[in-house]
Image (tube, rainbow, N blue to C red):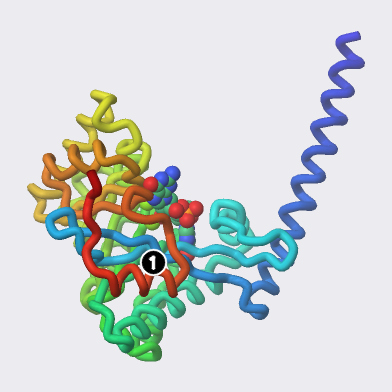
Amino acid sequence: HAKEHGRNTFRFYTADMNARAREILAVENQLRRALERDEFVLHYQPQVAMSSGAIVGVEALIRWRHPERGLIGPMQFIPIAEERGLIGDIGEWVLREACRQNRAWQDEGLPPIEVAVNLSAMQFYRRDLAEDITGILKETGLDARWLALEVTESVIVQDVESTIATLAALKAMGLKLAIDDFGTGYSSLSYLKRFKVDKLKVDRSFVMDIPGDADDSAITRAVVNLARNLGLQVIAEGVETPEQWSFLKQEGCDEVQGYLVSPPLPAIDLANRLARGAWTLQG
Ligand code: C2E
Ligand code: MG
Ligand code: MG
Ligand code: MG
């Protein structure tokens, strides 16, 4: 009986695995065509200064307008793009599109803001990353100070010496560097003084349960203080409630990003938000 059950389980398992493998292969093939067919789109989520409520930046977040499946979020295809070696081309498209759009907003006379782009580890370890970005900035006419790159701790700990060299080259160009999802990776704090980063992003997993959860509140407070004491900027991601806002404000956090202010928006909606001016906390 047990044997039979085991066999069934195994058969079910393999069928499932084959379906999964087929799915990944299908997505890979469609991803290869998506760039040519212009199926990717960036949405932009506001980052506001807590002191003024002004939108000071946006994070560019990729979506895939799939012809049959509709709008697909990055978690469903970025890992596959990374695994199948497609992230270089997609990442380059993201960088170019984000820079082009930010320059277009400036040309429309909107207040200048920073655009933050997420980088995968594989992009970061390309030897000509700084050169590629220089080319994109020149091509799009965006000044480097309006571009920020978000990298995770996992990127930094992979190869410390080469990371320092790459970060130094990027910093020399005048763009901004942020550590994304800070506190969730395996980074050593001692690296923070060697890496010339500008900003720490407190991960949403910590922000989620403040101020009710004592541990998450302590961690968030510690990260904010760490950043301030090192002279770095600090932004909290995933802020959804006025209570979270108040806690962060009291702790001296510089900026906030989250559904409380706005979800990621299509470019046109972001421009309208930007034109309307500062965001204020209601009631
Ligand atoms: P991330 O860089 O940590 O981006 C923040 C994610 O949190 C975004 O999800 C955003 O929509 C979501 N978020 C923001 N505020 C809130 C909130 O208040 N509540 C909740 N529940 N969620 C919030 P999204 O757009 O699905 O992106 C997921 C991840 O995909 C990103 O995490 C980033 O790691 C990756 N990603 C997105 N775009 C790109 C890209 O162009 N290149 C690469 N390499 N990765 C990207
Ligand atoms: Mg990010
Ligand atoms: Mg993040
Ligand atoms: Mg995150």
Q: Is residue 237 left or right of residue 38?
A: left
x, y percent for residue 200:
24, 52
**Residue in the image at 48% along x and 69% along y:** 42
**Residue in the image at 28% along x and 66% along y:** 57
Please identify the quadrant where the C terminus is shown: top left
Residue lying farthest top? 1
Front-lying residue, 47 or 272: 272
Task: Give the residue at mark 1.
Answer: 117
> In the picture, residue 146 is in which quadrant?
bottom left
**Residue in the image at 35% along x and 77% along y:** 130
Callout 1: CB less than 8 Å from ligand 1: yes
* Residue 98 seen: yes
* Residue 122 seen: no
Q: Where 61 sits versus 268, above or below? A: above
Please identify the quadrant where the N terminus is shown: top right
Q: Is residue 252 left or right of residue 72?
A: left
Front-lying residue, 43 or 16: 43
x, y percent for residue 12:
84, 30
Label 1 Cα crowd, 10 Å radius (few <14 / some 14-19 / many 20+): many
Judged from the image, the secondary structure of the residue bearing numbered disc 1 is: strand
**Residue in the image at 10% along x and 49% along y:** 228
Q: Is residue 114 left or right of residue 85?
A: left
> In the picture, residue 17 is in which quadrant?
top right
Q: Where 153 sits versus 7, above or below? A: below
Amino acid of disc 1: Val
